[in-house]
Structure formats: C-alpha cells, structure tokens
C-alpha cells in the first residue's frame, strides 16, 4: 500500500523533484534520474575539490616524463 502511494507521488511529479513529509519531517524524496545524476556529479566534484585543496600544500616533486 505505502509503496503504491509513493509510486503515485513520483508519477504525479511530472519530472520534478518531490519530498513527502511525515509529521513535518522528510520521509520520502524522489528525483528524476537526470537530476539525481547531476547531484551525484556535483557531489563528486566537491569531494575532488576538497582533495585538491588538501594536497595543494604538499611539497611537489619534479619528475621527467621520460623517467616514468
């Protein structure tokens, strides 16, 4: 029963993101596949930026490409 209700909410979203509340707290979130992919890509970018910022202060080592 509950899954049918949630499926109907997702279907009636017309391609938009929807959050269902239970006692004013998020209980179910729906996002179209494209929106979800964009969110995950953005999250990955933020994680990589954080990693770059951490490593930016490390000492660099010069390497000749021919030595690799």
Image: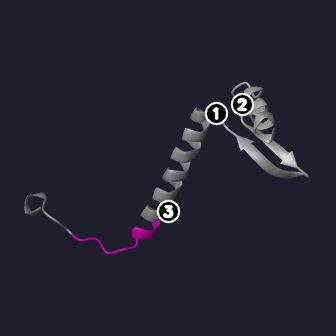
Counting other residues with Cα less than 10 Å from the Cα at mark 3, is it few (<14), some (14-19), or many (20 or more)? few
**Residue at coordinates 72% horizontally, 36% vertically from top-left?**
17
Residue 53, relative to residue 36: is it above or below? below
The secondary element bearing badge 1 is classed as loop
Instruction: Please give the name of the residue rendered at 69% of the width and 27% of the height, measured from the top-left corner.
Output: 15
Mark 2 or mark 3, which is nearer the start of the sequence?
2
Q: In the visual, does 52 lie left or right of 43?
A: left
Residue ranking furthest to the right: 23
Q: Considering only vertical position in the picture, is 65 above or below 57?
A: above
Q: Earlier in the sequence, mark 3 or mark 1?
A: 1
Height in image: 35 above or below 63? Answer: above
Q: Quadrant of the C terminus?
A: bottom left
Task: Residue at 64% x, 33% y: name it.
Answer: 32
Residue assigned mark 2: 16
Q: Provide residue 3's location: percent of width, then percent of height.
A: 75, 39
Residue at image coords 57%, 33% = 34
User: Which residue is nearer to you in this view: 46 or 9?
Assistant: 9
Is 58 on the left or on the right of 35, as rendered? Answer: left
For label 3, the residue is 50
Q: Secondary structure at mark 3?
A: helix
Please tell me which of labels 1 and 2 falls first in the chain.
2
């Amino acid at each position: 029963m509950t899954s049918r209700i949630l499926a109907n909410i997702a279907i009636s979203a017309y391609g938009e993101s929807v959050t269902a509340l239970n006692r004013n707290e998020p209980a179910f979130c729906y996002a179209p596949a494209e929106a979800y992919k964009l969110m995950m890509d953005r999250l990955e970018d933020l994680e990589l930026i954080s990693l770059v910022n951490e490593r930016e202060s490390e000492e660099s080592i010069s390497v000749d490409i021919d030595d690799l």
